[in-house]
Image (spheres, rainbow, N blue to C red):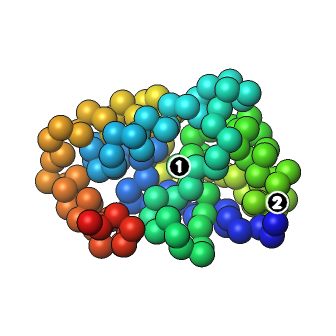
């Protein structure tokens, strides 16, 4: 398999669930629930890479989430280790994830990020609703 996932962007996207400055409640509850699972000990983590939410699920150009890379110690991520073994990421992308430092403040764990995001699910504020509208325009796979 050829390398298909790109390294994280220079900064996590404006809707990244790991960013401290992103409004709560912009993603579905199941998306926030995923964040906690990457806090587990390495053998108990998910095997799938956490990809940026800004791209359609069926897009040919996908990248690893900058917030995920910045929040977690890359060398401890089971998904990243497996992705190198199966060729989903190359050595340069692996290094980019392991060495990633976010230029914007991130939550210190998936648990913290999830708790923040879930707090707004019932009643997203105006900033959250505005960002939801923007995401829906960008992500054609999310429109009904």
**Few, some or many C-alpha atoms within 10 Å of disc 2 (few <14, some 14-19, many ≥20)?**
some
Cβ atoms under marks 2 and 1 closer than 8 Å: no
Q: Position of residue 24 (x, y in %)?
A: 28, 43
User: Which image quadrant for residue 120?
Assistant: top left
Q: Which mark is residue 67?
A: 1
Q: Is residue 125 visible?
A: yes
- The residue pinned by badge 2 equals 87
Which percent across, then down, holds residue 64? 61, 57
Instruction: From the viewer's perspective, tell me whether residue 80 is left or right of residue 67.
Output: right
Determine whether the residue tagged by mark 1 lies in a helix, strand or loop. helix
Q: Nearer the viewer, mark 2 or mark 1?
A: 2
Q: Quadrant of the N terminus?
A: bottom right
The percent coordinates of residue 142 (x first, y second) are: 34, 64
* Residue 73 in which image quadrant: top right
> In the drawing, does residue 132 fall left or right of residue 9?
left
Residue at 85 percent across and 51 percent down: it is 85
Kind of element beneath mark 2: loop
The quadrant of the image that shows the C terminus is bottom left
Foreground pick, 104 / 115: 115
Residue visible at 46% across and 29% down in the picture: 111
In this orientation, does residue 102 appear?
no
């Amino acid at each position: 398999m050829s390398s298909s996932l790109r390294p994280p962007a220079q900064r996590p996207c404006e809707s990244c669930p790991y960013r401290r400055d992103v409004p709560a409640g912009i993603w579905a509850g199941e998306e926030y629930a995923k964040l906690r699972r990457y806090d587990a000990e390495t053998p108990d983590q998910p095997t799938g890479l956490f990809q940026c939410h800004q791209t359609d699920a069926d897009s040919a150009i996908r990248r690893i989430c900058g917030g995920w890379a910045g929040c977690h110690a890359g060398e401890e991520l089971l998904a990243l280790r497996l992705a190198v073994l199966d060729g989903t990421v190359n050595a340069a992308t692996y290094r980019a994830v392991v060495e990633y430092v976010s230029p914007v403040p991130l939550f210190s764990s998936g648990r913290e990020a999830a708790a923040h995001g879930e707090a707004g699910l019932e009643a997203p504020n105006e900033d959250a609703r505005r960002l939801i509208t923007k995401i829906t325009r960008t992500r054609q796979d999310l429109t009904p």
